Image (cartoon, coloured by chain):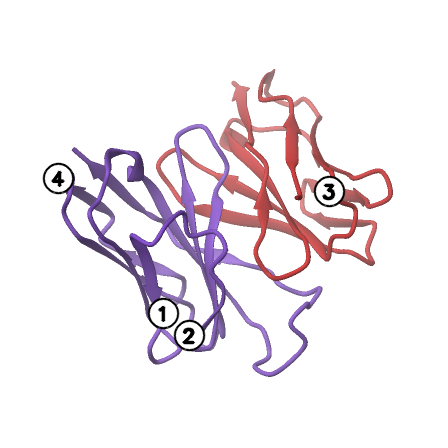
Amino acid sequence: KQEVTQIPAALSVPEGENLVLNCSFTDSAIYNLQWFRQDPGKGLTSLLLIQSSQREQTSGRLNASLDKSSGRSTLYIAASQPGDSATYLCAVGPSGQNFVFGPGTRLSVLP
Amino acid sequence: GAGVSQTPSNKVTEKGKYVELRCDPISGHTALYWYRQSLGQGPEFLIYFQGTGAADDSGLPNDRFFAVRPEGSVSTLKIQRTERGDSAVYLCASSWLPLGGAVMSSYNEQFFGPGTRLTVL
């Protein structure tokens, strides 16, 4: 059974810092991995989707990498801003189409 | 519509009652998913539809939960005899998967609705 963990559970940084969020999964036979952002009381906003054949994806200040063999993905946020404050979730797509989610990392960027 | 919509946004009910939660996916998306999210946790898969049929309902916790998608678009999640433990945010997502195509596709970007917050008193 696929299990997904995220470290750290919570992170507080001053504005302008570069930061890395980590996601680990137990079954490396995944088809894709997706990073989401969730604001309090809101649904999930898709940030980046990495196919199993890809190593990384970039969108603006965000860069996500995938290492299937080690069961890890990282989300790199450059020059963090207070508006980046949210919970960041990673989800892996194993066999079948449903995603297995990690518990999330709560990020606070202080002005 | 522009995105996935869910109604109602909030639902408060009493233990033992029946509730229906509605999801309207992105137009043209063939696949629809239901997840449940408890406070402080990531979403947990419930059921997935490809077209009108439930392709995977392995996440439904018990037979009090049922979902339909009769015309391959809007879906309704139905919960009978609600219990306090059913309280959570119920999230719906949709994605485009070719009908009749490979079951296991590497491309499956899911787009989520805002969720329905269910509170069972």
Residue B1 - label: 1
Q: Are marks 1 and 2 in contact (CB under 8 Å)?
A: yes
Figure quadrant of the C terminus of chain B = top left
Q: Earlier in the sequence, mark 4 or mark 2?
A: 4
Which label's residue is closer to the chain start, 1 or 2? 1
* Chain ID of residue with mark 2: B
Q: Is residue A42 above or below residue B51?
A: above
> Which percent across, then down, holds residue B95?
53, 66
| Mark carried by residue A86 | none
Same chain assignment for discs 4 and 2: yes
> Which residue position is annotated with label 3?
A63
**x 35%, y 80%: residue:** B71
Instruction: Identify the residue at image location x=55%, y=25%.
Output: A107
Spatial CA span between label 3 and label 4:
45 Å
Residue mark closest to the camera, 4 vs 1: 4
Hue used for the chain lettered B: purple
Quadrant where the N terminus of chain B sits is: bottom left
Mark 4: which amino acid? Glu
B110 or B65, which lies in front?
Answer: B65
Instruction: Between residue A102 and residue A75, name the one nearer to us.
Output: A102
Dot 4 corresponds to which residue? Answer: B14
Q: Which residue is at a point 60% across and 79% down the rendered structure image? A: B98
* Callout 3: SS: strand
Say which chain tag 4 marks: B
The CA distance from mark 4 to mark 1 is: 32 Å
